[in-house]
């Protein structure tokens, strides 16, 4: 679970770099500079969207692991209680 959150945090940090790319401006006023900047902005926006999706996926996986861990612990507690009722021990 912690590994998924750590990975999500890395994707979140990487989004800051993608934002810089998405805000890129051309170095000059000629057509080529503007066109080049537009291509970099498009790449930055695509990267930002992808990183955001990856972050959401990792956070979702962390939540699923947390829920599964809780269900596992409850099932173990329930089975321990059943065993103790029959006079057994763990």
Image (spheres, helix red, strand yellow):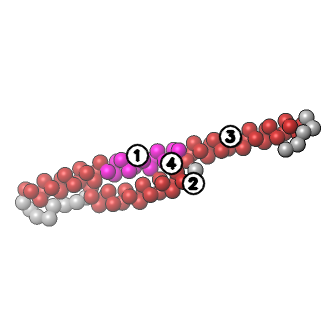
Please tell me which of labels 3 and 1 falls first in the chain.
Answer: 1
Question: Residue 30 at what x, y percent from top left?
Answer: 6, 60
Q: Are marks 2 and 4 in contact (CB under 8 Å)?
A: no
Q: Is residue 11 toward the left or the right of residue 60 in the image? A: left
Alpha carbon separation for disc pair 2 and 3 = 18 Å
Q: Nearer the viewer, mark 2 or mark 4?
A: 2
- Pointer 1: residues within 10 angstroms few (<14), some, or many (20+)? some
Residue at (47% x, 53% y) in the render? 8
Residue in the foreground of this view, choosing between 14 and 29: 14
Mark 1 vs mark 4, CA separation in Å: 10 Å
> Which residues, given as a range, are shown in magenta?
47-61
Say the numbered circle drawn on residue 71: 3
Mark 4 Cα-neighbour bin, 10 Å: few <14, some 14–19, many ≥20: many
Residue beneath disc 4 = 59
Principal SS element in the magenta part? helix
Along the line of sight, which residue is nearer the eye, 88 or 27? 88
Sequence-wise, the earlier of marks 1 and 2 is 2
Are dots 2 and 3 in contact, CB under 8 Å? no
Which badge, 1 or 4, comes first in the chain's sequence?
1
Q: Which residue is mark 1?
A: 53
Residue under pointer 2: 2
> Is label 1 in contact with label 4 (beta carbons under 8 Å)?
no
Label 3: how many Cα within 10 Å (few below 14, some 14–19, many 20+): few
- Label 3 – label 1 distance at C-alpha: 27 Å
Query: How many labels, in total?
Result: 4
CA gap between label 1 and label 2 equals: 18 Å
| Mark 2 / mark 3, whichever is N-terminal | 2
Q: Is residue 66 left or right of residue 4?
A: right
- Answer whether labels 3 and 1 touch (C-beta < 8 Å): no
Q: Quadrant of residue 21?
A: bottom left
């Amino acid at each position: 679970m912690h590994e998924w959150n750590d990975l999500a945090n890395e994707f979140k940090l990487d989004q800051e770099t993608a934002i810089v790319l998405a805000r890129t401006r051309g170095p000059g006023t000629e057509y080529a500079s503007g066109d080049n900047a537009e291509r970099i902005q498009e790449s930055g926006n695509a990267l930002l969207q992808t990183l955001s999706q990856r972050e959401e996926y990792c956070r979702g996986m962390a939540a699923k692991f947390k829920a599964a861990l809780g269900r596992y612990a409850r099932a173990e507690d329930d089975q321990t209680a059943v065993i103790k009722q029959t006079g057994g021990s763990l």
